[in-house]
Amino acid sequence: MAVKIIKIKPRQAGIPAAETAKVRAHVDLESFMWEDNSTLNKGTTTRQNMFDWIVNKKGIAYVEDRGNKIPVYGAVTPDGKKYIRTVRDNAWTDELLNLDGF
């Protein structure tokens, strides 16, 4: 099962310029609204649960950007905070931060 992340619930707004600030912005995402296009199920989950589902349960999540599916992976900060982030062309990207809030 793959889910598309469609909205985010951040603690702060906007995309910071510095990479360390971007990681902090991803860590500050509290929860995600998602939909499963194969079952039409929708739901909301916390950052920790989404990380666990992707990393430990081998779930697949993505963000859609102009018709392209951008995969979402789990990441961990040097001090152990777990978060998720998109990857495009083998580099971390910020498509999650561009989603609408809820």
Image (tube, rainbow, N blue to C red):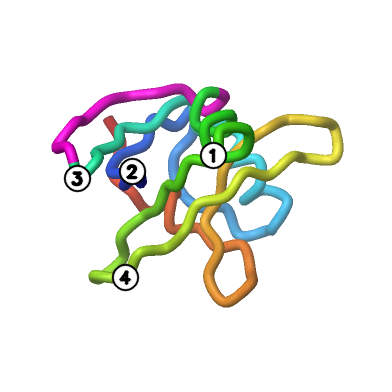
Badge 4 vs badge 1, beta-carbon distance below 8 Å: no
Residue in the foreground of this view, choosing between 79 and 55? 55
Q: Quadrant of residue 13?
A: top left
Dot 3: within a 10 Å radius of its alpha carbon, few (fewer than 14), some, or many (20 or more) residues? few
Q: Residue at x 62, y 43 (%)?
A: 74
Residue identifier under label 4:
68
Residue in the foreground of this view, choosing between 27 and 68? 68
Residue identifier under label 1:
54
Q: Amino acid at mark 2?
A: Val
Nearest to N terminus: mark 4 or mark 3: 3
Badge 4 vs badge 3, beta-carbon distance below 8 Å: no
- What is the distance, in whole Å, between disc 2 and disc 4 at their CAs? 14 Å
Dot 2: within a 10 Å radius of its alpha carbon, few (fewer than 14), some, or many (20 or more) residues? many
Nearest to N terminus: mark 1 or mark 3: 3
**Residue 40 counted in the magenta span:** yes
Q: Amino acid at mark 4?
A: Asn
Dot 1: within a 10 Å radius of its alpha carbon, few (fewer than 14), some, or many (20 or more) residues? some
Q: Amino acid at mark 3?
A: Ser
Residue identifier under label 3:
38
| The N terminus lies in quadrant | top left
Question: At which x and y percent is residue 35?
Answer: 24, 38
- Residue 62's place in the image compared with 48, above or below, is below
Q: Amino acid at mark 1?
A: Ile
Q: Residue at x 52, y 56 (%)?
A: 86
| The C terminus lies in quadrant | top left
Dot 4: within a 10 Å radius of its alpha carbon, few (fewer than 14), some, or many (20 or more) residues? few
- What is the distance, in whole Å, between disc 3 and disc 2 at their CAs? 9 Å
The disc label shown at residue 3, or none: 2
Q: Is residue 14 left or right of residue 48?
A: left
